[in-house]
Amino acid sequence: MDDCIFCKIIKGEIPSKKIYEDDKVVVIMDANPQVDGHVLVIPKEHITDYTGLDDTQLSHINMVARKIAPTLMEKLGSKAMTFVVNYGASQVVKHFHLHLIPDYLVKEKSDKSLDEVYDIIK
């Protein structure tokens, strides 16, 4: 889709901080993270929301999330991980994406820059 920010990121038209990529998905740092290490798992195919995913796509996204989450937790010292999928009015970007949000048991961001956090987890 021409005006989709995630499609533009996937095509390399907009820079991002990728921490993982394969032929089906890309995992990037959220540009406006809720906490340090907040990342997005995004399918490369433009799929508006979770109702458009087939079982194979959903399984692959979950497999990647299961691979990435422990690494984020270990490298950033978080104690838990929250997985979030927005749907409907709460979905700001109309391209399916899974949020992986480290839980530090303290709901505040540090003073680290996005670049500093990226350097820790890449």
Image: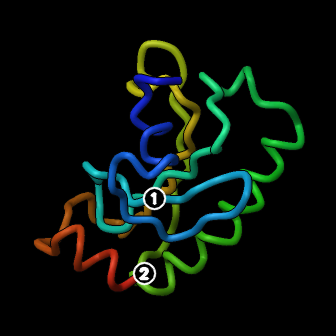
Indicate the position of residue 117 as horizontal and vertical percent values: 29, 76
Picture disc at residue 90: none
Picture quadrant where residue 51 is located: top right
Return the x and y of residue 97 as percentages of the image width and height: 55, 40
Instruction: Determine whether 110 is above or below 11 in the image.
Output: below
> Position of 98 compared to 22: left or right?
left
Is residue 64 left or right of 89 when viewed as pictured?
right
Q: Which of 74 and 25 is in front in this view?
A: 25
Position of the C terminus by quadrant? bottom left
- Residue occupying the point 51% across, 56% down: 100
Q: Which residue is drawn at 47% across and 75% down?
A: 79
The three-letter code of the residue at mark 2 reads Ile
Callout 2: SS = helix
Residue 26 x/y as whole percent: 58, 56
Image quadrant assignment for residue 35: bottom left
Q: Given the current orientation, which residue lies at the most extreme top position?
A: 89
Q: Nearer the viewer, mark 2 or mark 1?
A: 1
Location of residue 36 with respect to 8 vertically, above or below: below
Check disc 2 and report the residue beneath it.
Answer: 121
Residue drawn at x 68%, y 27% as measured from the top left:
50
Q: Earlier in the sequence, mark 2 or mark 1?
A: 1
Q: Measured from the top left, where is residue 93 in percent x and y?
A: 42, 27
What residue does disc 1 label? 28
Please state the total of marks drawn on the protein image. 2
Say which residue appears at 51% left-offset and 68% top-offset: 80
Q: Label 2 vs label 1: CA separation?
A: 11 Å
Q: Residues within 10 Å of mark 1 (few under 14, many from 20)?
A: many
Q: In this view, does 24 lie to the left or right of 46?
A: right
Say which element carries label 1.
Answer: strand
Instruction: Look at the numbered discs 2 and 1 and tell me whether their residues touch, using CB distance below 8 Å.
Output: no
